[in-house]
Each structure stands twice: as structure tokens, then as C-alpha cells.
């Protein structure tokens, strides 16, 4: 990212906070954006945020990865230490409370620069540790939305990396099933981090299948593996067959649905992989929810691995739990090689 994109620390504001070296941990949920702006600017700021953070989990109802909570400028002082803060204003009307707030936050030169050039300023840890702080100060809707293509992926990466950092600390640092992790490594040649509270549902390591779960909400992660390269990382036809037969083979009572079924090529821990997402449903009961899978071939161990995640949480938010399971899955490591 070039310097002239100005996605850098707001140094002028940091100067005011040099005395605050020991900052408290940022507050708030990791799936919520606090957006501070005046009512007349809400629609434009909302469209900008939605354009950047457009990832959605289908449960089957669409559920965005980030909820947006709007706060009027007068409430800023009470919420400025939240984990994910966006302060926005459109135009330069001095009667607009959002404009007044941003003029207090930025020196005049920087304020004018955002109106005339790049409308986005970004920094980490401004008021609290592990905080992301974004200022959106645009002259018009057109100027703001024109900035999205150049900023979108970089910004998403900042927020998703921060989510992983904060949630990994929450999930893994307090306690883990270390004895199970060690056993997996010794017996199967691979391991992954298993948080406290997760139980082994089925261990069929002799046929290459392992399944753990947690209640409240119901979450499941399974790993299936077999010798050799059984997938084509280029052609997805064999992947489709593998996916469709997986649930009835290993879970027995569920199947995958073609609604919002999606396959894409990704890197899983730096290995070429297929990422598959969609909806699962019970064959026996009116139950279902989202699923996520990764399938890849590890050359060092000469094995093909399939990691699958399911969640059942009817009527409640699921995206943050699915993203937590994704972190568990991505802690997967091969520990022994052929």
C-alpha cells in the first residue's frame, strides 16, 4: 500500500495521547462496528461500510460478519474506547455535529486534505489497546465511494486480522485440551488447538476421522484424512463429489443443501486448498444451519485433509461462532511427515 493512500496512523491525534502509555484493552464485541455520525450522513456512511465489509454468512438467512451500531456525535466520548470505531461526516456544513466532531479530532490542514484528496484515515490503538479507529471525512458521496476499490481489501484485512488476534486470545489463552492435542499429534501426525469446553464426540482415527463439539450454541468441527492426493486443486468436480457425500458418510443424519453453495480456491495455512460453504440440514428433524469446509493436500505428509465445521443456533447470531471455529480449524498443523 503506497504512502499516498494515507491509510496510516493519525499522528496528529496521537500527540495528544503520548502520556497514555498504558492503555486499557478495547471494549465491545468483535462483530460490532460503532459508527459515530450525524443523522443526515447515516445513509451514505452505511453504504460505505457495507461496501467495504460485505462478507455475509448465510444461515440460511443472510447474517453480516459485522453489525453496525450508529451513535450520534454527542455519544462519542462514552464509546471512543470501543474495539472498532468509525467516525464519519459528509460535507463541510459547520452545523453538522459530525463535522464539528471531526474538526475537533483533526488539525485544519489534515481536515482539508481529507475533503480534497483521500477521505479515509486509519489507525490502531488510538484510545485503547487492540482498537481499530477509522475516520471517514468526505466532501461528497461520490468522493467517498470512489475510494472503496483501492481501500477495501486492505481495510478488511486489518479488521479480520484484529478479529483473529482478539478472538484467539479469548478462545485459546485461558485453557486448552492440551492432553487431547498431544494425543492427536502422537497418534495421527497432526494436531490443532482445542479450547476448554470442547469434547471429543467421535475418535475413529483408525479410519481417518475425528470429531469434536461444543454446546450453547451447538458447534462441531471434524477432520477426515486419507493417504495420498485424492483431490485436484485445479478442477473442482471431484471436490463437489467429496463434499456432497461427506455428511451422510460421517455424520449419517444430515446432508448439505445446494442453497448458497459456494466453492472457491484459497490458501489454508499457505497450502492451496478448496474452501466450501453452504447450508446443512437434518434428514430426521427440522434442523439446519451454515457449514464451512477446507479440503487440501499436504505434500509433506502425503495426505489429503478435510476440515468441516457446522453450527446449530436457531434464531440467534451465528457468524461470530463460525468465525471462532474457523480460527480453531486454522490452528491445524501437521506434526509428523512420511
Image (cartoon, rainbow, N blue to C red):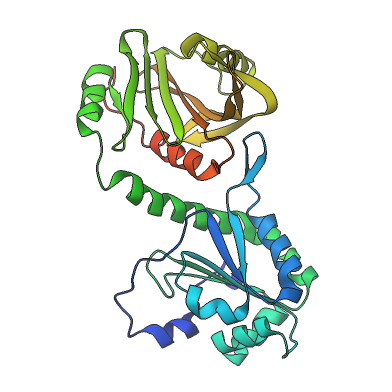
Quadrant of the frame with the N terminus: bottom right
Quadrant of the frame with the C terminus: top left
Q: Is residue 165 above or below residue 233?
A: below
Answer with left or right where residue 53 lies relative to residue 79: right
Percent position of residue 104, x then y: 57, 89
Percent position of residue 19, x then y: 32, 85
Q: In the rendered image, which quarter is residue 228 located in?
A: top left
Answer with left or right where residue 34 lies relative to residue 39: left
Query: Measuring 44% from the left and 66% from the top, which residue is drawn there?
Result: 131
Q: In the rendered image, which quarter is residue 324 located in?
A: top left
Q: Is residue 112 above or below residue 203?
A: below
Q: Nearer the viewer, residue 289 or 50?
A: 289
Q: How many marks?
A: 0
Answer with left or right where residue 85 lies relative to residue 204: right
Q: In the rendered image, which quarter is residue 25 located in?
A: bottom left
Residue 200 appears anywhere in the view: yes
Query: Measuring 40% from the left and 50% from the top, which residue is drawn there?
Result: 167
Query: Measuring 46% from the left and 36% from the top, which residue is drawn there?
Result: 217
Percent position of residue 33, x then y: 56, 61
Percent position of residue 312, x then y: 52, 31
Q: Is residue 304 above or below residue 97?
A: above
Query: Measuring 65% from the left and 75% from the top, which residue is drawn there?
Result: 37
Q: Nearer the viewer, residue 255 or 210?
A: 255
Residue 1 appears anywhere in the view: no
Amino acid at each position: 500500500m503506497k504512502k499516498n493512500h494515507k491509510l496510516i496512523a493519525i499522528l496528529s491525534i496521537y500527540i495528544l495521547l503520548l502520556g497514555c502509555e498504558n492503555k486499557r484493552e478495547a471494549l465491545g464485541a468483535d462483530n460490532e462496528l460503532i459508527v459515530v455520525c450525524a443523522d443526515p450522513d447515516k445513509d451514505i456512511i452505511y453504504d460505505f461500510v457495507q461496501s467495504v465489509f460485505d462478507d455475509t454468512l448465510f444461515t440460511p438467512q443472510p447474517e453480516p460478519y459485522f453489525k453496525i451500531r450508529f451513535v450520534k456525535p454527542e455519544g462519542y466520548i462514552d464509546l471512543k474506547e470501543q474495539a472498532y470505531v468509525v467516525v464519519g461526516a459528509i460535507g463541510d456544513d459547520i452545523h453538522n455535529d459530525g463535522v464539528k466532531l471531526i474538526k475537533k479530532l483533526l488539525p485544519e490542514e489534515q481536515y482539508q486534505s481529507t475533503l480534497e484528496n483521500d477521505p479515509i484515515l486509519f489507525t490502531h490503538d488510538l484510545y485503547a489497546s487492540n482498537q481499530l479507529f477509522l475516520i471517514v471525512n468526505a466532501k461528497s458521496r461520490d468522493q467517498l465511494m470512489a475510494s472503496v476499490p483501492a481501500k477495501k481489501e486492505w481495510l478488511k484485512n486489518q479488521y479480520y486480522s484484529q478479529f483473529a488476534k482478539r478472538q484467539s486470545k479469548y478462545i485459546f489463552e485461558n485453557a486448552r485440551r492440551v492432553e487431547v492435542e498431544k494425543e492427536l499429534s502422537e497418534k495421527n501426525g497432526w494436531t490443532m488447538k482445542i479450547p476448554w469446553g470442547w469434547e471429543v464426540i467421535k475418535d475413529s482415527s483408525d479410519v481417518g476421522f475425528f470429531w469434536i463439539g461444543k454446546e450453547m450454541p451447538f458447534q462441531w468441527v471434524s477432520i477426515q484424512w486419507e493417504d495420498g492426493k485424492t483431490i485436484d486443486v485445479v478442477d473442482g468436480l471431484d471436490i463437489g463429489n467429496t463434499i456432497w457425500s461427506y455428511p451422510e458418510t460421517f455424520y449419517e443424519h444430515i446432508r448439505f443443501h445446494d442453497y448458497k453453495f459456494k466453492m472457491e480456491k484459497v490458501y489454508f495455512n499457505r497450502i492451496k486448498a478448496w474452501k466450501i460453504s453452504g447450508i446443512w440440514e437434518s434428514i430426521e428433524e427440522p434442523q439446519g444451519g451454515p457449514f464451512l469446509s477446507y479440503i487440501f493436500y499436504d505434500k509433506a505428509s502425503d495426505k489429503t485433509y478435510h476440515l468441516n465445521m457446522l453450527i446449530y443456533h436457531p434464531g440467534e447470531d451465528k457468524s461470530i461462532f463460525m468465525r471462532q471455529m474457523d480460527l480453531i480449524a486454522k490452528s491445524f498443523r501437521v506434526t509428523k511427515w512420511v
